[in-house]
Image: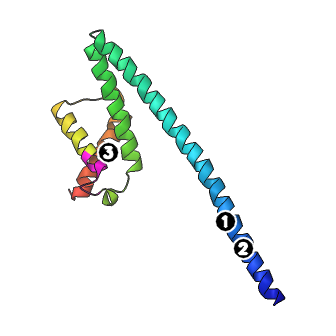
Amino acid sequence: MKSRSSIIFALAALVVGIVIGGGGVAALCGRFTNRFIISASAAEAGTTVHILKQLRAGNTTNAVEELEMDLDEDLMTLGSFLDNPRGLKSDSPYNKTLQMARDYRIQFPHNSSSPLIDEATAKAFGLLDAQQGH
């Protein structure tokens, strides 16, 4: 009987430890995620304000070039993180976004001043071809 009580006590302690530990991890991850989202939103808002000011001042060429650079950065990120074309479903929002960006770049060709950036954006578009079996 004594060993049964010890086992129940040990299991209860284990469950309590898992719950408390899981709560701590969840809180830590939640704070990290919040900070990441806040930082990304603040950076995006700053960029948007800068571009809006350029547009309102009539500097459309500069505003378009900055948006093209933003698109390059986003495509580089997508190409880096979506490195498995088989995981890219044809109806996913990522696929649709990549297709929309590629259609835009076909209509309005753009090359950056960096071959590395151009290569990275081509890699992102290559995910569409690989996913479609081309």
Residue 105 at x, y percent in the picture: 22, 35
> Which residue is tagged 3?
124
Q: Contact, CB < 8 Å: mark 2 with mark 1?
A: no
Drawn side of residue 14 relative to residue 56, left or right:
right
**Which of disc 1 and disc 2 is earlier in sequence?**
2
Which element is circle 1 on? helix
**Quadrant location of residue 23?**
bottom right
Q: Compute the Cα span from label 3 to label 2.
A: 50 Å
* Residue shown at 24% from the left, 55% from the top: 91
* Contact flag, marks 3 and 1 (Cβ < 8 Å): no
From which residue to which does the magenta span run? 89-96
Could you tell me which residue is drawn at 41 percent across and 49 percent down? 81
Above/below status of 6 relative to 102 = below
Q: Nearer the viewer, residue 117 or 67?
A: 67
Q: Earlier in the sequence, mark 3 or mark 2?
A: 2
* Residue toward you, 133 or 53: 53
Q: Secondary structure at mark 3?
A: helix
The residue that disc 1 covers is 18
Give me the residue at 81% from left, 90% from top: 1
- Amino acid identity at mark 3: Ala
- Closer to us: mark 3 or mark 1? 1
Residue 108 painted magenta? no
* Disc 2: which residue: 12
